[in-house]
Amino acid sequence: MRLLHALSRAGVGLAALTLSVGLATAQDYNEAPMLAERVEAGELPPVEERLPANPMVVEPLESVGQYGGTWRLVMNSPSDISTPVRTIGYENFVRSVTWQPDLEQTDIVPDVIMNVAEDVEINEDGSEYTFHLREGHKWSDGEPYTADDVMFWYENVYSNTELFPAKPTWSVRNDTPLVVEKIDDTTVKFVFGGPNGLLLQYMATPANDAEPNQPFAYPRHYLEQFHPDFNADAAATAQAAGAQSWVQHFHSMADAWRNPDLPRLNPWIVTQGIGQGSGNQLIAERNPYYFKVDTEGNQLPYIDRVTIDIISDAQVTLLKAANGDFDMVDSYIGFVTTPENRGTFFDNQETGGYEFYEVLPNRANLMIISLNMTHKDPVLRDLFGNKSFRQALSTAIDREEVIELVWLGQGRPYQTVERPESPLFDEEMATQFTEFDIAKANEMLDSLGLTEKNGDGIRLMSDGRPLQFTIDISVIRQPWIDSAELIKGYWRQIGVDLLINTSDTTALNQRVEANDHDAAVWSASGGADSLFDPKYYFPSSWAAFYATTWGQWFTNDTNPEEPPEAPKRQMELYQQIFAEIDADRRQELMKELLAISKEEFYTIGVMQPTADYGIINIALRNVPGVLLASTEYTHPGAANPEQFYYASE
Amino acid sequence: MLAFIARRIVYMLVTLVAISVMTFFIIQLPPGDYVTAMVAQLNLQGTTVDPAEMAALRARYGLDDPLPVQYWKWISNIVFAGDFGFSLQWRRPVADLLWNRLGLTFVLALVTLLFIWAISLPIGIYTAVRKNTVGDYLATFIGVIGLAIPNFLFALVLMYISFKYFDTGIGGLFSPEYENAPWSLGKLLDLGSHLIIPTIVLGTSGTAALIRILRANLLDELAKPYVTTARAYGVSERKLLLKYPVRVALNPFISTVGWVLPTLVSGATITAVVLNLPMTGPLLLQALISQDMYLAGSFIMMLSALTVVGTLLSDLLLAWLDPRIRYT
């Protein structure tokens, strides 16, 4: 009971647990015909021996499916690792529940359920997590997955400073890195330097990295041959394979998306990696040792194969998607379902054999204007640092018009704020200073003493220079540039002269990192993302374009500058949230943090997108009609792609 | 002859060294490096990378070494070990990536070259012999249009037509069912049907240029006294035409062979991107965008080597074809 209590307090849903308990009774398992053939031929052991003693039971969304078919997807570049991770590689220790519109959310992020780990015990203060692995769980090559693999990750990968010189933030508490102990073959204990209340939530985020550094990603029996702790010739092997060092070679060999030989725990295992073959496609086939079954004991996944085309030209992706060449395309897979392409997709629905679904993009704001409050020029710094000035500029933006003209009406005129679906939504925060009123904005600027104007009607700053500044915009999103042109027009009416400078993202980032910018535009995600990457609620890194140097202070980066009281208080609160294991208390702390953001009015938000859309093969089943998506909430992985299936004609 | 070749090879080496230095440094010119480009990409998806992690990556890839050191590491590996380095973006040895794509690139280059010759040779001769007739004007008109339409636009239009009216797959060189199948007659035919659009797109502009050159050269030759003399001797019109003036006018066909390969490997980039062809051009473009300097650098080196070797070969061919050219 202690365990259950601890779990529910930590926000871990119990559905998965109760399901695995119900499975304790022995039953007959079924498998895909293609695997049955291989069992028949003696190439594979029978399904009972391949599954763990307690397979995880996944309840199909609508109905028990049938085996077969190929799931055809698309990614936009060889480094777009997050597409395979989100679709076919979401097998962490724990996972997020499938979000449903009627699901009540108790925490800041959607609830977490057990996955690769069968269950977890958490001590009173949340500093020790004991994970139980599944008895008899196997890697995709049939070798057992045990505590030894976790220990290999901990001792030889995570703790190896050559492989990972920096420790990931989730694993460090009070400056002490994680310690992992092996209790027995299926039990490991994670001990932290202090309370780590959001560990499970963090572990449920997608491992969006070619070098995952996670306890479920390093099969010891395969990888030890590339590691000098186990193989004295590792460096020579690496050289012979064309790598520059054993570190590089080890990382390539441990890269599930490029090395087909690496054993994995995923539902589909890569057989042709990124850059192999003609280099145009990633292919994955079902994992015969996958540890999940449906409610009738059929081993998952239902779908036999997955192909992910690598296409860098968006027009080609669009044309192929409209032709029905992909089974699932949206703003997170393929990235071509923009508002302006909706018409094309609509016209080709019949011939392409797809239909539409809704994606809640979890964007807090798609266009945020940041004025650099830590500017090197003292006059501009004073001006941008003045809250009334920012409020005046915000009041002088006709958001309705911008949204109508640039985003074809697909947005709400909000500041940077959580989405209305979230328990953290604050309507007042969303709508403050969004009422378009040129007269009022002029009044506000007048009251700041900016009353002198030059011959062109541009206000003069305290040192007599005209009030003119440059906004840096990355060329990757055309709507940003179009909106900025409109905003330039509105601000001209209040005597502010805006210059627009478009550049490549890398150049923009360099300018910002060096604190050389006046103002810049970017977007922010909400929900789980605002918890793990809250840079638009307080300066948590250099990428907080409104206060680069304060963010650099928080992360011990270059050019740090000590921030004032309010952001410092937020930084404290943020640390507390991660230490807090009580979900309700965490939410209160987050609300407190957001209240300060609201009060401080760091940035000027222009629009929050309403809903994105996606297109899906009409024969694909068990996919929710509305999907939640964000960087940290795994889409579509959290909807259990292993139980998607194709209805027969 | 041998001295000529030896001298040319020395020049070639000097050229290649100069090119290698230039490319390496030009690739480094844009702001940032591979790590900043990668971080920019991650930022777009909403992920922020720890400064410590960025520093670690830079150290691992050797990006914080001074430029001359980076250059020496790169070039010495190529020269002494035949190792073209490691692509940061693909995380694979550059050589693997290149060889995978070069094969199909050469096939397409060859097919396109044959297409250009097959079309432009007869048309060029026809337009010269039947100068200022309706046929000449028509061929010239079509040729100029082919030259004037930007390749990528032409590719998009052809793709749209095939999408709208024919039930063929769009882009790529293989249908999905053959993509990873072993070679068979079916796969060969499938490749053939997918090669039609790229060949037409890449071929049209080259065809137009060659038609014009051949026509002009041939017109010059036809007016020369030896033609009249031969005709007076009663040599048949067809034999007369093919044996002498056409042979002389063929020079441009041969002298351009050397450029065809590099143009197709790099110049067809936009077309290959639009048509989603598994060729080398898009790979180079991607490498440049993501500042994957070893891939991009090795690539450009390879192209330069091809151009230089191709030029030498075409010079030798030309000398063989036209004895009037001396080895000087």
Image (cartoon, helix red, strand yellow):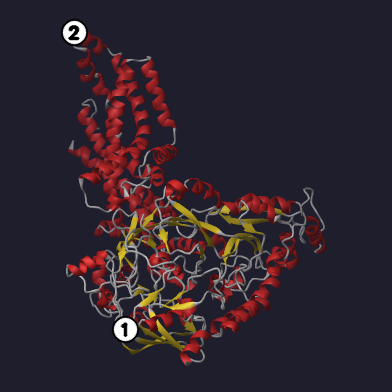
Residue A73 lies left or right of residue A443; in this view the side is left
Residue at position x 65%, y 51% in the image = A404
Residue A10, position as x, y percentages in the image: 51, 84
Task: Say what amino acid the circle numbered 2 marks.
Answer: Tyr
Query: Which quadrant holds residue A333?
Result: bottom left
- Residue B113 can be seen, yes or no: yes
Residue B2, position as x, y percentages in the image: 18, 38
Pick whichever, A525 or A160, lies toward us: A525
Question: Relative to A580, does residue A537 appear above or below in the rendering?
Answer: above
Question: Relative to A277, does residue A219 appear above or below in the rendering?
Answer: below
Residue B161, position as x, y percentages in the image: 41, 37
Chain containing the residue with disc 2 = B
> What residue does disc 2 label?
B233
Residue A277, position as x, y percentages in the image: 28, 55
> What residue does disc 1 label?
A135
- Residue A319 can be seen, yes or no: no
